[in-house]
Amino acid sequence: MIARGNTDQLPDDQRIVITGIGLTAPNGNHYSEYRENLLQGVSGVSDYEIRYVGKTVAGICDFDERRYQSRKDRRRGTRAGSVGIYATNEAIKDSGIDWENTDTSRVGIYLGVTEHGNVETENEIFELKGYDYDTSFWSHHHNPRTVANNPAGEVALNIGVTGPHYTIGAACAAGNAGLIQGAQMLLLDECDLALSGGVSESIHTFGIFASFRSQGALATHSDPTQASRPFDVNRNGIVVAEGGCVFVLERLATAKRRDAQIYGELVSYALNTDATDFVLPNPERQAECVQLALKRGGLSPEQISIVSTHATGTSSGDAQECAALQSVFAGCEQTHFNNTKSLIGHSMGAAGALELAGNLFSFRDRVCHPTINVKDLDPACELPGLVTNQACEIPQPIYVLNNSFGMLGINSVVVVKKF
């Protein structure tokens, strides 16, 4: 637990703040570019083709992998590792930390992932086919590429961190879970700086597309920019996306000492489990997760300015989450709701982190970015205050609540306060 009630009453070494953001998303490789495209409703979803599945749509990132990696390191590593390396270096640069004089034994890396290793194993088997499945041609890089800690480990190698590093497997709640883990480690004094968030290379595995298609949950549309359409009555599934977002987390006392910029203060969070189904969400448990985060932060629903929804564009999932939100935020006239996946697709392990990042600048510009592609709102998804198709100005936002849920019934909520 981070805090109860007004965090201003807490000692500065018990308050956690965000002092840097680095990201790559399908519609932007820097925070300012990403934010502007969200406000303008610019989609990052495009046509995509992958072996065995064929033509589909996806959220594809286009960042410079060589900006922070040598050709050799990129060849040895993974796409998820490159995403993490890019986002982490950008976050450190954005934070203004004197990295050369930082004690890296007191830096922790906590990156959420949905899945890892599928891409590398699929690629090896595909290559092996050309050698009549002779396993002597199997790459010796396969093991370090596919171990669960790989993305965080590649980041640690790249920037020389000797403190703790690991990935957090939390399905599509992983981006939030990475942030939560970083805050917990700071409060436990296990590190002085936490590099936290989530990464995804999901579009490079044909298996995820094939699986969603077999479930009837893979989005299709003649115009790829309109394929991701949460809350619309004609939504027909998920748009798979890649991406990554890493936050620099520090105790407020440390941030003050170096006169750091502060994007927001992490004031509460919650994690719980549905324990009811492999895939289908449970709105009661989701509502309980939101309520727990509010309770821990000493907050009422009316205090939340923006709710960043998880909604993926599936027929049942969106309605279930809306039922949960309607039960918690009934009568909250000043609360606005939006959805970032409509603009970038579902970036899996990075989703929670990217979606939070997309809303943090509301503290500065007082604008809520829209949910696009809502042409015919599903009556089951009618949330008062849902921002659709066009950004809107809002009263001074104080709190952003970020929902992120995943398969096997994992739910996560993070609340960030304007500092």
Image (tube, rainbow, N blue to C red):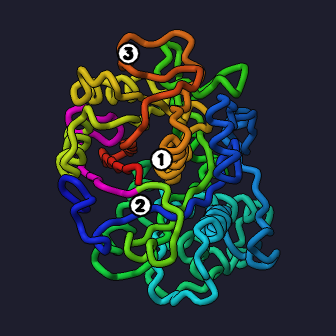
Q: Secondary structure at mark 3?
A: loop
Q: Residue at x 32, y 42 (%)?
A: 278
Disc 1: which residue: 356
Disc 2 to disc 3, C-alpha distance: 30 Å
Q: Which percent across, then down, holds residue 235?
A: 52, 20
Image quadrant assignment for residue 40: top right
Q: Is residue 112 left or right of residue 26?
A: left
The quadrant of the picture occupied by the N terminus is bottom left
Q: Which percent across, then down, holds residue 259?
A: 51, 72
Does residue 3 belong to the magenta stretch?
A: no
Up-down: is 81 above or below 405? below
The quadrant of the picture occupied by the C terminus is bottom left
Up-down: is 119 above or below 363? below
> For mark 2, does the 10 Å Cα neighbourhood hold few (<14), some (14 to 19), or many (20 or more) residues?
many
Q: Is residue 105 left or right of residue 33?
A: left
Does residue 280 belong to the magenta stretch?
A: yes
